[in-house]
Amino acid sequence: MTDLGKIADQAVTETDIVPLSEAVKVWARVAALSFGGPAGQIAVMHRIVVDEKRWIGEHRFLHALNYCMLLPGPEAHQLAIYIGWLLNRTLGGMIAGLLFVLPGFVSILALSYVYVLFGNVTVVEGMFFGLKCAVLAVVVQAVFRIGSRALRNGPMVGLASLAFVAIFFLHVPFPLIIIAAAVIGFLGGRKGASAFRVGGGHKAGTDKILEDRDSLLGEEIPPHAAPNLAWSLKTSGALAALWLLPVAGLLLGLGQHDVFSQLGVFFSQMAVVTFGGAYAVLAYVAQQAVDGFGWLRPGEMLDGLGMAETTPGPLIMVTQFVGFLAGYRDPGSINPLAAATLAAVLTTWVTFIPSFLWIFAGAPFMERMRGNAALSGAMAAITAAVVGVILNLAVWFGLHVLFREVATLTLGPLWWDVPILHSIDWPSLILTLLAALALFRLRQSVITVLLASAVLGIAWRVLS
């Protein structure tokens, strides 16, 4: 039995905060309802775990969320692992994290099969045409939504602007931008600068909050959540082995130029630097997948994001679609669909296993670090920089959705893409504007806008 299995078995023999069978039902319900990106997923989790079940209090929930926002990877997935661990120890965290990903994985895998087998069918083409336009509007909305929360003062606006210039004009690697922002925020928070103070994270679901002392968990740290270096090292070692040994095996067995080795290495690297959620890193992933590796064509990244937006689970599940297409188009000696499926599993594995590692390694120590000013400052700066990065994503998507041709301008060390104006795609522009109107003015949900845009896209393709 592996070390991780022994740890899980040990967790079962100890007393849980809530019955494990009840926890499984609740996490399955959270997973099934987790549509609408991280904000919607966190809101669902808050409503069920805090407001309805009253398992943990408001402040404990927000403390866990703030820690997850500091980590690379999908914060909603990590929050589920964190709360599952608080309530049901290691096994509870594993179950919560696995259930959170499973519905999205199955849904996107099924849609990926449809995409490669029937993508040239008019109805399918129309559906993804409509989704592309809606996703562009959703990304623009994300710029405003996150920006309104993060850019509260001049220094935060300055960090967002510098991040945009660095990634759009200078093509500074995304990880360096996030690291620089984190260092600036950490130092600013440590010195007590008011610009780097953060609030409580995402807005709570109710006006009257549930105090920690009134929740089932209470306000004290449960015994299993107390810092234990030996436990953290053992658990982290087992998870690191599950994450990195398969990648090392691919490199040794297939070589660094094989598509499976490239997927394992690239998305393992992304798992370490994906601060700020899916939108922040998608431009970098898209550019590398399209221009660097040739796995996708520009518009296909938007197709994948449309799948991720319309299925439950983290938006970063779009990486599964990238892996699927990469395996399908470079299958080696095996069947293309089999290669695509294996590549999707590999990509999902190396994307999400690190989330369990970050939580189990750090959460016990974070329980004793509530309100740390330096860490809060780093979080504020990263969130501000992410606004600039997401703006870059919106511009990049916009160029490829609204125009059939783009050109590159160069000025010294700066170079950037500009649209060829006469190549504007009028149907895409009209549908994008309609989606934006529905989101910004009519206040329709993301799912409603995506589904309506898919229907309009199908109608356009059928009638044109």
Image: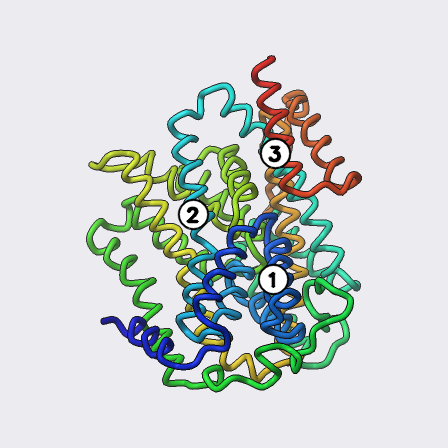
Q: Residue at x 80, y 39 (%)?
A: 441
Q: What label sits on residue 48 in the rendered view?
A: 1
Q: Is residue 85 above or below residue 105?
A: below
Q: Residue at x 30, y 35 (%)?
A: 337
Q: Residue at x 38, y 27 (%)?
A: 117
Please state the horizontal and vertical placement of residue 326, each as a whole percent of the image: 36, 39
Q: In this figure, which residue is indicated by the disc labeled 2?
A: 105
Element at label 2: helix
Please state the horizontal and vertical placement of residue 343, each as a whole percent of the image: 33, 45
Which one is nearer the viewer's eye here, 364 or 350?
364
Q: Is residue 219 above or below residue 126?
A: below
Q: Is residue 287 above or below residue 297?
A: below
Q: What label sits on residue 451 in the rendered view?
A: 3
Distance from Cα at disc 2 to Cα at disc 1: 23 Å
Answer with mark 2 or mark 3, whichever residue precedes in sequence: 2
Can residue 148 be seen here? The reply is yes
Element at label 3: helix
Q: Residue furthest top?
A: 464
Local crowd size for mark 1, using a 10 Å CA cut-off: few (<14), some (14–19), many (≥20) = some
Distance from Cα at disc 2 to Cα at disc 3: 20 Å
